[in-house]
Image (cartoon, rainbow, N blue to C red):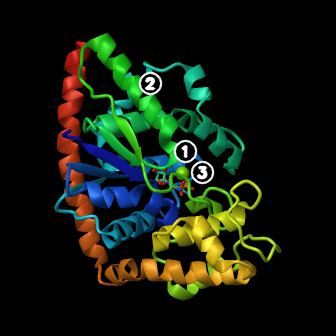
């Protein structure tokens, strides 16, 4: 099957191991097989915060992370929301295709509202999944490598594509989500690893920073290490992480640690993560920030051409 791959991340902080095992590893594989667009979702930073914050810095860091994990700018178009007005214009007709009830019952949006520091829920918070439909459909994306939290959003995109095609004639493919080896990696507090929840291990963390982060991970006093997602989420999170980095199932790591307790679990996890991240860190150390920004400028140019064509097609289909 000839796919077009689209996915992306918000420039809200450094990419972490959750991103890697949820989505980035798939991207690195797929870039050799299919055309791929990777989005720096800068407009979406303000869905759950008042200001974009260190947006320039975070965008550059995101680019460095992408290049460090092995995304090849010769194969992948890396671009940003704020540079593609034609993509953002798709939001308008797309919003007319969904009901407010559908937007309000999106489980990921509900969860993000719970974790948001904002006192009022913005219109953007409720509608950003439709904005994501524009992200995916502007390039006629068919395959979307994402973590589990994004599945309801990909459903919104499928709905938008189907309804648009029904009303105006077939313009869009109906895309599919593709989840990685670990669709929802736990963070160091046992909850979903997230940039903005202070519970992540960034890909760019040094070996010492990684050790310090894992030392502070939430575990328990039971010396016998067992893999139990429900009863021991913190322990299970570390076992999963070590297992992913070592390419072994988590229960096997637990059996090996046996009665070693949290200290041994943390030592094993730290070594596994540091071995895994070593080549990524080495590549990152060789990257140049100006080169990374040039990659984005070139990607923005290519993505914009694609968006202009799609918006033209949309306007024609709608009779404008
Ligand atoms: P923020 O806290 O700012 O929302 P985030 O860590 O949730 O940041 P996003 O930029 O929202 O990261 O998500 C980027 C991609 O990474 C999405 O496809 C998302 O599903 C995936 N992802 C994020 N966190 C995890 C995780 N813990 N496990 C697996 N995939 C994840
Ligand atoms: Mg998120």
Kindly identify which numbered label has been placed on residue 49: 3
Rounded to the nearest angstrom, the CA distance separating label 3 from label 1 is: 6 Å
Provide the residue designation for mark 1: 47
Using the rendered image of the protein, determine whether residue 239 is visible from the camera's viewpoint: yes
Image coords of residue 196 (percent x, y): 60, 60
Using the rendered image of the protein, determine whether residue 200 is visible from the camera's viewpoint: no
Q: Up-down: is 78 above or below 245?
A: above
Rounded to the nearest angstrom, the CA distance separating label 1 from label 2 is: 16 Å
User: Which quadrant: the C terminus?
Assistant: top left
Image coords of residue 59 (percent x, y): 40, 63
The quarter of the displayed image where residue 318 is located:
top left
Provide the residue designation for mark 2: 95
- Residue at the location (44% across, 78% down)? 277
Rounded to the nearest angstrom, the CA distance separating label 2 from label 3 is: 22 Å
Circle 3 SS class: loop
- Whether pointer 3 and pointer 1 mark residues with C-beta atoms closer than 8 Å, the reply is yes
Left or right of 147? Residue 27 is left
- Of callouts 1 and 2, which one flags the residue occurring earlier in the amino acid sequence? 1
Q: Up-down: is 161 above or below 201?
A: above
User: Which quadrant: the N terminus?
Assistant: top left
């Amino acid at each position: 099957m000839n796919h077009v791959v689209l996915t992306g991340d918000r420039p809200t902080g450094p990419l972490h191991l959750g991103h890697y095992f949820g989505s980035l590893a798939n991207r690195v594989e797929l870039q050799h097989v299919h055309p791929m667009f990777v989005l720096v979702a800068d407009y979406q930073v303000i869905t759950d915060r008042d200001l974009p914050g260190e947006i320039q810095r975070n965008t550059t860091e995101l680019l460095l992370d992408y290049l460090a994990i092995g995304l090849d700018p010769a194969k992948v178009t890396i671009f940003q929301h704020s540079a593609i007005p034609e993509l953002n214009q798709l939001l308008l007709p797309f919003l007319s295709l969904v009901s407010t009830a559908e937007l309000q019952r999106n489980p990921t949006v509900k969860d993000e509202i719970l974790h948001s520091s904002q006192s009022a829920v913005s219109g953007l918070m409720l509608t950003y999944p439709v904005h994501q439909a524009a992200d995916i459909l502007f390039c006629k994306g068919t395959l979307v490598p994402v973590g589990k939290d994004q599945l309801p959003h990909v459903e919104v995109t499928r709905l938008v594509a189907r309804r648009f095609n029904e009303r105006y004639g077939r313009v869009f493919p109906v895309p599919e989500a593709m989840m990685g080896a670990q669709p929802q990696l736990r963070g160091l507090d046992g909850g979903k690893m997230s940039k903005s929840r202070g519970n992540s291990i960034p890909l760019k963390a040094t070996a010492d920073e990684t050790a310090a982060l894992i030392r502070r991970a939430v575990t328990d006093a039971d010396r016998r290490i067992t893999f139990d997602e429900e009863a021991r989420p913190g322990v299970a999170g570390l076992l999963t992480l070590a297992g992913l980095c070592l390419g072994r199932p988590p229960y096997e790591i637990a059996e090996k640690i046996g009665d070693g307790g949290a200290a041994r679990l943390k030592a094993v996890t730290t070594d596994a993560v540091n071995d895994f991240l070593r080549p990524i860190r080495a590549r990152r150390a060789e990257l140049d920030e100006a080169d990374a920004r040039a990659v984005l400028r070139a990607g923005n140019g290519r993505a914009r051409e694609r968006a202009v064509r799609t918006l033209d097609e949309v306007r024609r289909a709608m009779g404008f």
